[in-house]
Amino acid sequence: MTAPFTDVHEAHIKRLQALEAHIDDEGLLIGDTHVMFFAEAELMSMHADALLSGTTRANILEVGLGLGVFAEQAAAHRCATYTAIEPHPQVASLTQERVLRRVTRDTVVHVRPWQLVRLAPRHFDAIMYDTWPPDGLADADFEAFVEHVALPSLRPGGRFSFFSSGASVSPRRAAILSERFRDWSEEQYTLPPGRIPIAWTKPTTDFTIPVAVR
Ligand SMILES: C[S@@+](CC[C@H](N)C(=O)[O-])C[C@H]1O[C@@H](n2cnc3c(N)ncnc32)[C@H](O)[C@@H]1O
């Protein structure tokens, strides 16, 4: 069974792909909106630690490559392979060139939405999920991702994390993690006031770093 990729998803991806992407001093803009900031490096470093501490030569999957802030932090953990999914061709090539070459020699970027990518079963040691879903579908897509991608493609004992705004994981996502994973936990992080970029677009500076174990 494949993950749902509806007309709404298709239209969303087409709109996204039609927007210009560029990087400025603060981060990545798609169209005229900043979607990721260099200031999120410390937060992404906590995700990388939660996913990769204690692993050796991990096979990593990142869904939503974006600016490569997570990938840069993951590089410190010396992974074996890095697979990224990023449907915006310009974003994929900018970040592949600027960041991925330094992460490991063995990298693959699928320039498609995650719903249309087939991955090897039980291959990955760690998965980071950080996408930009259509309005109103964030939780439904998250659930579909867990069922159709995270669980089948993680090896037993592999770890899953995702970008999570706010002071705690939402009740719906907490229930999905509790039902579908062996164990999970979360840490809190607040972006220090002195490091908030001028162009900050996110609804909060509070985040959680969830990690679930398959
Ligand atoms: C917030 S950014 C990711 C930031 C990235 N994790 C980093 O550390 O820089 C979200 C990314 O998800 C991508 N995206 C949107 N829809 C997607 C989909 N269906 N599959 C995979 N990636 C998607 C966007 O193009 C965008 O680059």
Image: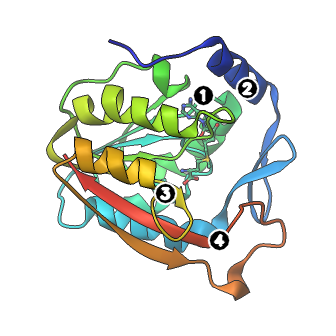
For label 4, the SS is: helix
Instruction: Name the disc covering residue 70, or none.
Output: 3
Asked whether the viewer can see residue 76, the reply is no
Marks 4 and 3 in Cβ contact (< 8 Å): no
162 above or below 201? Answer: above
Query: Alpha-carbon neighbours of circle 4 within 10 Å: few (<14), some, or many (≥20)?
Result: some
Q: Is residue 37 left or right of residue 123?
A: right
Disc on the earlier residue, 1 or 2: 2
Q: Earlier in the sequence, mark 1 or mark 4?
A: 4
Tell me, yes or no, whether the two marked residues, 1 and 4, touch with CB atoms within 8 Å. Answer: no
Checking the image for residue 39, the label placed there is 4
**In whole angstroms, how far apart are the C-alphas of marks 1 and 4?**
23 Å
**74 over 58 or under it: above or below:** below
Give x and y (percent) for residue 47: 40, 63
Dot 1 or dot 3: first in sequence order is: 3
- What amino acid is at disc 3? Phe
User: Ligand 1 is in which quadrant of the figure?
Assistant: top right
Which amino acid type is marked by label 1? Pro
Callout 2, which amino acid? Answer: Gln
Distance (Cα) linking label 3 and label 2: 22 Å
